[in-house]
Image (cartoon, grey):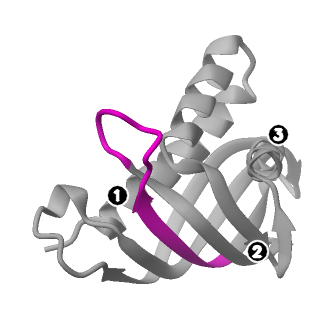
């Protein structure tokens, strides 16, 4: 049985949690975020967002800046599928593809009509997970290709 979906969910959720901590100030949050980011994304990753190529550092900056006004971040996963590469029996080493959707809801620092303002980013993604030859120990898997189609919008206020 493959563990690609839990692997990806765990690491993405941690990155978004850490990005919130990073914005609360202090070097520890930034160091934790960078370590978490490095544990997910290969140094030579190929990224496209809405059809445009984005650098690894560009993705890192997007994640950090999207959390800049947030007080709380929630990640909701939908319709995930995985396609493991053939010929690998050890579930701890399985590589392959994961695709699906996640919705990030950010509660913001300011209020609208006495309720916290919220923003949602809806992302359809496809990620290729492969072993990274530059890693010598631990979990060698990293995302080597990432394709996002995403849209950010405010959450409607219910009165």
- Seen at 84% across and 69% down, the residue is 53
Q: Looking at the image, is 136 positioned above or below residue 41?
A: above
Q: Provide residue 88's location: percent of width, then percent of height.
A: 17, 70
Q: Nearer the viewer, residue 123 or 56?
A: 56
**x%, y% of residue 55?**
80, 54
How far separated are the C-alphas under marks 2 and 1? 35 Å
- State how far apart marks 2 and 3 are (Cα): 24 Å
Disc ID at residue 158: 2
Q: Residue at x 82, y 79 (%)?
A: 50
**Magenta segment: does it hold 130?**
yes
* The label number, if any, that marks residue 68 in the structure image: 3
Q: Quadrant of the C terminus?
A: bottom right
Residue carrying label 1: 7
Could you give the CA–CA distance between mark 1 and mark 3, rounded to whole angstroms?
26 Å
Q: Nearer the viewer, mark 2 or mark 1?
A: 1
- The image position of residue 47, as x and y in percent, is 72, 66
Query: Could you tell which of marks 1 and 3 lies nearer the N-terminus?
Result: 1
Q: Residue at x 60, y 47 (%)?
A: 16
Secondary structure, mark 1, is: helix
Do labels 1 and 3 touch, CB within 8 Å?
no
Residues packed near mark 3 inside 10 Å, few (<14), some (14 to 19) or many (20 plus) = some
Q: Is residue 141 above or below residue 71?
A: below
Q: Earlier in the sequence, mark 2 or mark 1?
A: 1
Left/right placement of residue 86 relative to residue 128 reads: left
- Is residue 44 shown in magenta? no
Q: Specify start and end residues of the magenta stretch as a single range.
A: 123-140
Badge nearest the viewer, 2 or 3: 3
Would you say 104 lies left or right of 56 here?
left
- Residue appearing at x 34%, y 58% in the figure: 7
Label 3 residue SS: loop
């Amino acid at each position: 049985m493959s563990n690609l979906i839990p692997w990806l969910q765990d690491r993405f959720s941690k990155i978004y949690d850490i990005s919130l901590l990073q914005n609360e100030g202090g070097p520890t949050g930034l160091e934790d975020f960078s370590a978490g980011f490095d544990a997910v994304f290969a140094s030579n990753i190929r990224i496209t967002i809405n059809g445009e190529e984005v650098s690894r550092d560009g993705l890192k900056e997007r994640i950090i800046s999207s959390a800049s006004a947030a007080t709380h971040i929630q990640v909701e996963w939908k319709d995930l599928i995985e396609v493991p590469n053939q010929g690998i029996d050890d579930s701890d080493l399985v590589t392959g593809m994961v695709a699906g959707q996640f919705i990030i809801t950010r509660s913001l620092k300011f209020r609208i009509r006495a309720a916290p303002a919220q923003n949602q980013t809806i992302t359809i993604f496809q990620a290729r997970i492969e072993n990274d030859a530059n890693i010598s120990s631990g979990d060698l898997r990293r995302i080597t290709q990432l394709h996002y189609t995403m849209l950010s919008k405010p959450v409607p206020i219910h009165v």
